[in-house]
Image (tube, rainbow, N blue to C red):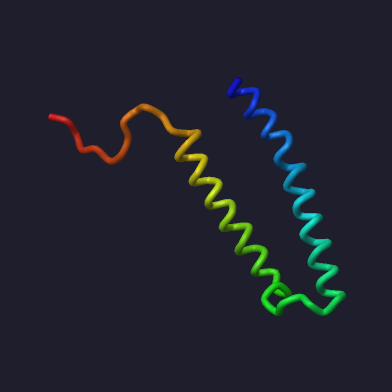
């Protein structure tokens, strides 16, 4: 069941991401034409920063919840 959900998520996630992106671009275009777009949103660095933050959070959640193994890890010195 876990594998099936993983495959489905990997197939659906890019499509969902595209539609969210297209929706946000449409909102930004409408605000720009109406003249209500804040100055900080006119810069592409804002979108890049937000996307980077979302990816970092997603990676940390993945490592913490999905890729968690029961094996001991860390930096261990040699055992005597």
In terms of depth relative to the viewer, which is nearer, 63 or 80? 63
- The residue that appears at 81% across and 72% down in the rendered structure is 31
* Residue 66 percent coordinates (x, y): 50, 34
* Residue 51 percent coordinates (x, y): 63, 57
Using the image, determine if residue 68 lies above or below residue 3. Answer: below
User: Which residue appears farthest toward the top when viewing the image?
Assistant: 1
Q: How many marks?
A: 0
Horizontal side of 14 relative to 66 (left or right) equals right
The quarter of the picture where residue 52 lies is bottom right
User: Which residue appears farthest toward the left when viewing the image?
Assistant: 80
- The residue that appears at 56% across and 58% down in the rendered structure is 53
Q: Quadrant of the C terminus?
A: top left
Using the image, determine if residue 43 lies above or below residue 55. Answer: below
Using the image, determine if residue 45 lies above or below residue 21. Answer: below
The quarter of the picture where residue 1 lies is top right
- The residue that appears at 76% across and 75% down in the rendered structure is 37
* Residue 42 percent coordinates (x, y): 73, 74
Horizontal side of 42 relative to 78 (left or right) equals right
The quarter of the picture where residue 34 lies is bottom right
- The residue that appears at 69% across and 29% down in the rendered structure is 8
In terms of depth relative to the viewer, which is nearer, 27 or 59? 27
Horizontal side of 46 relative to 73 (left or right) equals right
């Amino acid at each position: 069941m876990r594998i099936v959900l993983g495959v489905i998520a990997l197939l659906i996630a890019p499509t969902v991401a595209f539609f969210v992106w297209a929706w946000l671009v449409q909102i930004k275009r409408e605000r720009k034409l109406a003249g209500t777009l804040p100055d900080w949103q006119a810069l592409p660095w804002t979108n890049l920063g937000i996307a980077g933050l979302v990816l970092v959070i997603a990676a940390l959640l993945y490592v913490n919840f999905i890729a968690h193994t029961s094996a001991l890890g860390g930096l261990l010195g040699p055992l005597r």
